[in-house]
Image (cartoon, grey):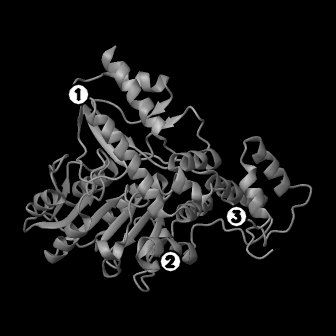
């Protein structure tokens, strides 16, 4: 049937696992409904009535959680900033691709890692505001950052990479490896965790660009606290100083609107498995056309040297790959687009604001996250004025709550989070502090 994902696959014979067997197996886990509908040509995504979103947003998002996420009702998950949660439709797509590969019922099954995936890359590139030939799929943001750090061929001993003290290890270790191997230097500067404005961050970073600085590498949204740096202004200023800009965007794609042409960065690394509903094992690598031509791949196969139009696909010629993660990533993007990125943003920022308000209400807590909406989105951070020690983590685990907790704590809010989840988290905090 036209449009069906099954159209090129004839029914399996009795010696193989049939689609009916597969769907029956999924039904055991409550996963078959959406996929069965798709097999009949209907929409694979069950979403609440749009009118409910305007009348009762909390009920709308709670119903969506029940319909599309496998999280148990008593599970509080406030950590998509580490690894996000796949909705049912994404999990279904991943399992479908795996099943196709296991059946091998058609020669059209894509199993290798040599494909350019022009259609998929084109769809993702349109979402991110860049050209298809500037975008490659990687396995994660760390891999993309390592390709950038180790692939730049014009850095010489004594050249400087400028970065910050709030980088994730995946965005900083790659530069330290480059320094250890080639004699470039890495200078890490301290930036304020609670700035008064984006301009304060901009001034701090730009004032540290020196004559030997060749690369400015920074997180668009920092991993430790969720602080949003003024990316476009930093990249523009770096270009004016002939400094390469590298953005670790692991927390950007899906959490905030990303338009790579507008941001003006030379390189960008993304992580769709955090905020874009993708399965683990998905990453993004972007290089601005003329800059991409200057980058060497680190793992190669046939086609690695094809620079036609500065084509990013050469960074994907790595050998056998797991296609199900790519199919799942694209399904996650479609899921996000069906819900509406603006609607998703309003919800996740609203929840983060609720959490920040709870912090401000408690004298034993000190907010790290600024109150300025330009500086945070769906991640907040705060400190306990007295170290709660291991007691807090144990109490959270006992309450079935997942969050990054400690003297400095980070909460991440996505659409599967509920106001009651935030209340439950702070209730445990109160119990620990007053015990």
- Cβ–Cβ below 8 Å for labels 2 and 1? no
Residue 363 is tagged as 1
Viewer-proximal residue, 305 or 370? 370
Question: What secondary structure is marked by label 2?
Answer: loop
Which tag, 2 or 1, sits closer to the chain's start? 2
- Answer few, some or many: residues within 10 Å of disc 2's Cα (few below 14, many 20 plus, some between 14 and 19): some
> Measured from the top left, where is residue 90 in percent x and y?
61, 56
For residue 139, above or below residue 393: below
- Answer few, some or many: residues within 10 Å of disc 1's Cα (few below 14, many 20 plus, some between 14 and 19): few
Q: Kindly report which numbered mark, 2 or 1, lies closer to the viewer in this rendering.
A: 1
Q: Residue at x 37, y 42 (%)?
A: 354
Viewer-proximal residue, 30 or 224? 30
Residue 246 shown left or right of residue 394 in the figure: left
Q: Residue at x 75, y 52 (%)?
A: 33
Which tag, 3 or 2, sits closer to the chain's start? 3
Q: Where on the picture, by quarter, is residue 254?
A: bottom left
Instruction: Measure the C-alpha gap from mark 3 to mark 2.
Output: 37 Å
- Residue to which mark 3 is pinned: 43
- Residue to which mark 2 is pinned: 303
Instruction: Specify the quadrant that holds the N terminus.
Output: bottom right
């Amino acid at each position: 049937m036209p449009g069906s994902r099954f159209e090129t696959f004839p029914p399996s014979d009795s010696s193989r696992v049939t689609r009916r067997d597969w769907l029956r197996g999924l039904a055991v886990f409550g996963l078959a409904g959406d996929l069965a509908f798709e097999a009949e040509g209907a929409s694979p995504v069950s979403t609440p009535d749009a009118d409910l979103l305007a009348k009762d947003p909390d009920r709308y998002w709670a119903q969506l959680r029940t319909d599309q996420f496998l999280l148990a009702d008593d599970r509080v998950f406030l950590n998509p900033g580490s690894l996000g949660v796949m909705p049912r439709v994404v999990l279904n797509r991943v399992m479908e691709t795996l099943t196709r590969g296991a059946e091998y019922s058609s020669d059209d099954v894509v199993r290798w890692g040599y494909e350019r995936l022009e259609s998929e890359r084109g769809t993702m590139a349109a979402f991110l505001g860049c050209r298809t030939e500037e975008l490659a799929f990687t396995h994660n943001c760390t891999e993309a950052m390592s390709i950038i750090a180790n692939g730049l061929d014009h850095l010489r001993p004594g050249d400087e990479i400028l970065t910050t003290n709030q980088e994730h290890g995946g965005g900083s270790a790659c530069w330290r490896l480059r320094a250890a191997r080639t004699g470039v230097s890495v200078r890490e500067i301290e930036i304020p965790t609670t700035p008064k404005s984006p301009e304060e961050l901009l001034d701090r970073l730009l004032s540290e660009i020196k004559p030997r600085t060749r690369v400015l590498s920074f997180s668009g949204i920092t991993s430790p606290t969720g602080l949003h740096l003024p990316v476009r202004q930093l990249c523009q200023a770096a270009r004016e100083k002939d400094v390469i800009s590298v953005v670790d965007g692991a927390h950007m794609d899906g959490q905030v609107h990303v338009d790579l042409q507008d941001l003006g960065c030379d390189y960008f690394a993304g992580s769709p498995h955090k905020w874009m509903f993708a399965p683990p094992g998905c990453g993004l690598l972007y290089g601005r056309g003329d800059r991409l031509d200057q980058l060497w791949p680190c793992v190669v196969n046939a086609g690695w040297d094809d620079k036609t139009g500065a084509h990013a696909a050469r960074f994907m010629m790595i050998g056998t790959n797991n296609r199900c993660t790519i199919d799942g990533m694209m399904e996650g993007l479609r899921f996000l687009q069906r819900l509406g990125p603006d609607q998703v943003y309003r919800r996740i920022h609203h929840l983060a604001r609720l959490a920040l308000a709870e912090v401000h209400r408690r004298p034993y807590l000190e907010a790290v996250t600024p109150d300025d909406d330009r500086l945070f989105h769906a991640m907040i951070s705060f400190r306990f004025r007295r170290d709660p020690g291991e007691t807090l983590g144990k109490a959270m685990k006992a309450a079935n709550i997942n969050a990054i907790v400690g003297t400095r704590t980070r909460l991440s809010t996505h659409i599967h989070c509920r106001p009651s989840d935030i209340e439950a988290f702070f209730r445990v905090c109160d119990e620990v502090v007053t015990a």
